[in-house]
Image (cartoon, rainbow, N blue to C red):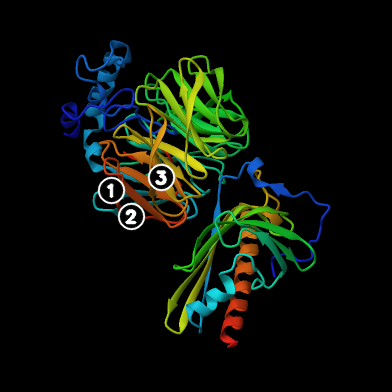
Amino acid sequence: MRCSLRLTGRLLPLPFAGEGGPRRGSGEGLAPYCPEASLPSPGSHPRGTLPRRGGRAFIALAYLLTSGASALAQEALVTAQLGNAVEIIDLASKTILQSIPVPGAPAGIAVSPDRKTAYVTRPEGHGVSVIDLDARRVSASLDLPGGPLGIGVNPKSGEVYVADWYGARVFVLRPNAAGLTLEGEIATGKSPSGIAVTPDGATLLVANRESDSVSIIDVGSRRETRRVSVGQHPFGLTLSADGRYAYTANVVSNDVSAIDVAAGRETGRVATGQRPYVIAFAAGKGFVTDQYSNTVTVFDPASLKKVAAIDVGDHPEGIAATRDGKTIVVANWGDNALSLIDPSSLTVTGTIATGDGPRAFGDFLR
Amino acid sequence: MKFRTLAAVAALATVTFAAQAHGPTRQKVSESIEINAPADKVWAIVGNFQDGNWIPVVEKTEGKGGNEVKATRTLTLKGGATVEEELAKYDAEKKLLMYRITKVDVKTLPVNDYSSTIELEGDGAKTKMTWRGAFYRGYMNNDPPPELNDEASKKAVLGLYKAGLENVKAKAEKGS
């Protein structure tokens, strides 16, 4: 069991600790994978930096009980937007296990807390498709108005949040036996894009691309409680593993903003390549896809200093860390391939061919 | 010819990309042609960013910065419409260049956030020339009108590429 190995794994400074590191923000499903691994050894950090243990241990236990097997599979769930398909790709054998037709230019993806169900947005087909990941087929569909793009799942309640790209709202969807039901909507800034939910399920964060801001939303009351100014046109939004810090990729100002969630303010920025899109964390470092530079910018999330730039494929978009934290996976929209990056050596270790126009915008690894 | 020369509609508002949201579905097209001429000869025709005359609809190229990254050029088309572009990548050894449109009227070319790559692969006396493009449709909002939807944008770009490639082939094979 990988999880138990990680308990004795190497330790990294909080809040970017653990090889699994901070998890994908947009479409974050289950937040911490093996959260204990992110705890520092006693005395290595001030008490104040420790995440809350109880809740995390519970999540880890629930995870082990419900989906231990899938943790070993290391699958990528890739939205091939121009190919109108969602592909289930085995990262170990680098093969497409199943291509599932999904019309409507599928783009955003999120996975349920038990990692058995994927939710895929269809910006052109205007809705969300529900995919049964064990059966590898579409099990339900819900039409939505506007332009559904960014998507996230509440790791506690399983609620699904979908951003309306053409509007200024997030839809709240409730999973049930028949699929999904539209329960309501929450007002945000303009062109909401990337979505993340804190590990405790209490706070929803939304990057408002056209408002140059992030909405911090109280899940209980379904209301925006704070709005934080960031760089120009934030798109992807990713939380640190403990949910204390959020990071946005600012497409126009070519940088990443760091946000202290509790304080409700931007704490700094780090310059990236051109058109940064989405951020992932592993091995204590941040990784940003630079759409126009065809690179992944690597930065230190603590100092907000650039560490390196790694050449990847054409128009890199979605990016995420595998659940064991040992691989960063990048979807290259332009040349229809995934790039695999070793987050320790910062080298590309392989590529995997995909369908046409992979976006993989969200929590696309399980 | 889809680079719409008739649309010398100076009155219509142009678009500054940096200020605009792009739609959710970027499109791409790719077109190749085999040319019976060595790659050096083809590169001499297409490899100068400051000379867009190999594109049939272009009447005049004005720019600055030569073939350095961030060089700019303004193409004036037959009929008077203009396209402003910026060089993003230039590799003379690989015979590859990439540039973006920074300003164009969607009546001239129905695209947004357009980038384009030209690449040559030489094989002795022959060359494969590929012209690729990535862009969003002309209409950036939901439910586009037919002339600015994904299909119309792809058709326009593909038409431009086919005409351009055939022109380069003709020029290169003519012998001069």
x and y percentages locating residue A311 in the rendered image? 39, 51
Q: CA distance from mark 1 to mark 3?
A: 19 Å
Q: Residue tagged by mark 2? A: A352
- Mark 2, Cα crowd under 10 Å, few <14 / some 14-19 / many 20+, is some
Residue bearing the label numbered 1: A91
Residue B56 percent location from the top left of the image: 68, 73
Whether label 1 touches label 3, CB < 8 Å: no
- Asked whether the beta carbons under mark 1 and mark 2 sit within 8 Å of each other, the answer is yes
Most foreground residue, B97 or A112:
B97
Among numbered discs 1 and 3, the one appearing first in the sequence = 1
**Residue B20 is at least partly visible in this image:** no
Spatial CA distance of label 1 from label 2 is 8 Å
Q: Are marks 1 and 3 on the same chain?
A: yes
Q: Quarter of the image for the N terminus of chain B: give it.
A: bottom right
Quarter of the image that includes the C terminus of chain B: bottom right
Q: Amino acid at mark 2?
A: Ile
Residue A295 spot, x, y in % from top left = 42, 48
Rendering quarter of residue A196:
top left
Toward the right, the furthest residue is B11
Element under label 1?
loop
> Mark 1 is on which residue type?
Leu
Q: Which residue lies under the disc numbered 3?
A: A296
Residue at point 45%, 29% (across, down): A247
**Would you say residue B121 is visible in this rendering?**
yes
Looking at the rendered structure, whether the residues under marks 1 and 2 are on a common chain is answered as: yes
The answer to which quarter of the image holds residue A27 is: top left
Residue that appears at 74% across and 64% down: B76
- Indicate the amino acid at tag 3: Val
Q: Estimate the spatial distance between the alpha carbons at disc 2 and disc 3, rounded to whole Å.
A: 17 Å
Dot 3 alpha-carbon crowd within 10 angstroms: few under 14, some 14 to 19, many 20 or more: many
